[in-house]
Structures are given as structure tokens and as C-alpha cells.
Image (cartoon, grey):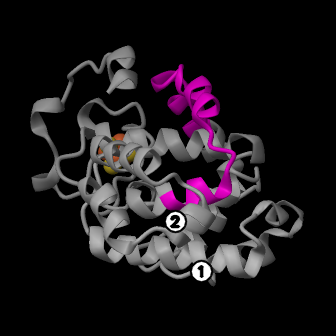
């Protein structure tokens, strides 16, 4: 897989989202436990509801293994209710907190010294922690050179022909890790999600005005899926970056 594709993609993403790089680093969450909890809450949840749940949890209980392992399950459920699936997620958060407290003394900072494979294996052993959640923590809390793959990134990678329909999570991750330079992985991750939300959308992608239009094979994008109103439409870069 040529890194030229990665360079071209990065140029387009930097052009579309010029201020994203600064926003990523200012919002970077160093505390791996907190990021783990936030990522568990973030699945299939809007940003607004996620933030409401995180703020409630922070205010009413506090986001630490000690506090969450001690807290009654009902209190965690009440706090995270805005994020949805609150019963199931509260149980997951409480189990993770107990294990982190009992097995690792409440401190996940040792992960920094593990190699990526061991670190991922350790995180995946926690209840309810999947590959994407583990990789988000590895990338953003520990600066490991990994590319977490969410539903937007999977879709874009397929449409661009970087991977095929049957590619596994690991295959997509490794492909993207090969085409992007290690120091661009965090930006590429966040920018591709933004790109998938606003342009390469699941339904009605804006192929007609997409800056990748000429180079993208649009694999799996049927004519019915296209947003025909977007053909020739000028996408104002700064307006996209604020969405
Ligand atoms: S041309 Fe269409 S399918 Fe390709 S990246 Fe752009 S929006 Fe997605």
C-alpha cells in the first residue's frame, strides 16, 4: 500500500480541518482510566449526550477506579443515563473500575511501558473493552502508534478502495498505520471521523463536491446513495471544520 495515498489524504484533511490539530491536543485526555470510561460511554451516542453523561458522572461520583468501584450501581446508572444503554454501561464501568483497582492498584500508567501488543491485550481483557476502545486509549493516553478504527473510518477506507468489504478491524487498522506517518495518526483519526460525518456520510455521501472525488473509486457507493444536490456544490472549508 503506497504512502502516497496517505500523503494525499492528509493534505486534503489538513485543508478541510485546519484547526483540528490544535483542538485534538488541547482536548487530549492523559488519564487513561478516564478516557476508557468516556470511550465506553461514547459508543452510539451523540457528542452532546456523551458530554452530559460525563459531566454528571464527574460531578456526582467522580471518574476514578476507587470512586466508581465504591459507588452504588444505581448512582452510576442515574449519572450516565443521557448516554443511553445506561444499565449495561453502568455494569461495565463498575466491573472495569473493580478490576483496575484490585488487579492494577487503580493505576493504569504502567501500560506506557508495555509494547503495543501487550498493552492492547491487557486492555482487551477488561469487560466491555473492544478493539476500538483499546486503541483510542493507546493512541490518545499513551501516544502509541496505532489507528483506532470506528464505523466512519471503516466506511471511508472501503469506499476509497484501501481495504475490501471483508477486511477485519485489524486489517483496516494495519493498512491505515502503513499509509499515515506515525505522528499524523491522531489527527488522521479525528479528521476522518469528521469527514465521515460531514462529507463521506453513510447515507448520501457528497461525492459531487468531495475534494477526493477525482481520485476516489467510490467502491460500494451506488447512484441512489449519492446526494445529487451536492454535485458542483462548493463546500466551504471553514464551515465544515466548525460542524
Ligand atoms: S468521493 Fe464520495 S465515496 Fe469517495 S471519499 Fe468522497 S464522499 Fe466518500
**In the image, residue 185 lies at what x, y percent?**
66, 46
Q: Nearer the viewer, residue 130 or 74?
A: 74
Q: Quadrant of the N terminus?
A: bottom right
- Residue at the image position 20 percent from the left and 22 percent from the top: 233
Q: Is residue 184 rendered to the left or right of residue 56? A: right
**In the image, residue 39 lies at what x, y percent?**
48, 58
Q: Nearer the viewer, residue 168 or 158?
A: 168
Q: Nearer the viewer, residue 200 or 57?
A: 57
- The residue mark sitting in front, 2 or 1, is 2
Residue behind mark 1: 126
The quadrant holding residue 23 is top right
Ligand 1 is found in the corner quadrant, namely top left
- Residue at the image position 40 percent from the left and 78 percent from the top: 91
Predominant SS of the magenta segment: helix
Tell me how many marks there are.
2
Ligand 1 within 8 A of label 2's CB? no
Crowd rating for badge 2 (residues with CA inside 10 Å; few <14, some 14–19, many 20+): many
Magenta stretch holds residue 33 = yes
Depicted 79 relative to depicted 238: above or below? below
- Residue at the image position 38 percent from the left and 55 percent from the top: 152
- Residue at the image position 58 percent from the left and 42 percent from the top: 188
Q: Nearer the viewer, residue 12 or 147?
A: 147
For mark 2, give the secondary structure.
helix
Q: Is residue 223 visible?
A: yes
Depicted 188 relative to depicted 230: above or below? below
For mark 1, give the secondary structure.
loop
> Which residues fall within the magenta stretch?
8-37
Amino acid at each position: 500500500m503506497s504512502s502516497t495515498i496517505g500523503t494525499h489524504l492528509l493534505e486534503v484533511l489538513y485543508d478541510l480541518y485546519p484547526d483540528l490539530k490544535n483542538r485534538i491536543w488541547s482536548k487530549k485526555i492523559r488519564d487513561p482510566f478516564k478516557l476508557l470510561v468516556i470511550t465506553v460511554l461514547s459508543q452510539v451516542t451523540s457528542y452532546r449526550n456523551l458530554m452530559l453523561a460525563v459531566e454528571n458522572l464527574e460531578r456526582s461520583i467522580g471518574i476514578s477506579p476507587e470512586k466508581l468501584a465504591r459507588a452504588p450501581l444505581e448512582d452510576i446508572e442515574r449519572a450516565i443515563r443521557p448516554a443511553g444503554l445506561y444499565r449495561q454501561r453502568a455494569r461495565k464501568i463498575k466491573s472495569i473500575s473493580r478490576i483496575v483497582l484490585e488487579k492494577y492498584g487503580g493505576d493504569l500508567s504502567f501500560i506506557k511501558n508495555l509494547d503495543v501488543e501487550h498493552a492492547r491485550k491487557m486492555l482487551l481483557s477488561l469487560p466491555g473493552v473492544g478493539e476500538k476502545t483499546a486503541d483510542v486509549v493507546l493512541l490518545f493516553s499513551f501516544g502509541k502508534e496505532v489507528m483506532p478504527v470506528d464505523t466512519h473510518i471503516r466506511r471511508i477506507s472501503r469506499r476509497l478502495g484501501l481495504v475490501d468489504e471483508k477486511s477485519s478491524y485489524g486489517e483496516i487498522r494495519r493498512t491505515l498505520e502503513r499509509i499515515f506517518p506515525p505522528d499524523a495518526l491522531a489527527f488522521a483519526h479525528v479528521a476522518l471521523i469528521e469527514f465521515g460525518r460531514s462529507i463521506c456520510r453513510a447515507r448520501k455521501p457528497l461525492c459531487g463536491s468531495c475534494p477526493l472525488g477525482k481520485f476516489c473509486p467510490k467502491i460500494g457507493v451506488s447512484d441512489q446513495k449519492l446526494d445529487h444536490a451536492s454535485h458542483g456544490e462548493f463546500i466551504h472549508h471553514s464551515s465544515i471544520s466548525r460542524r
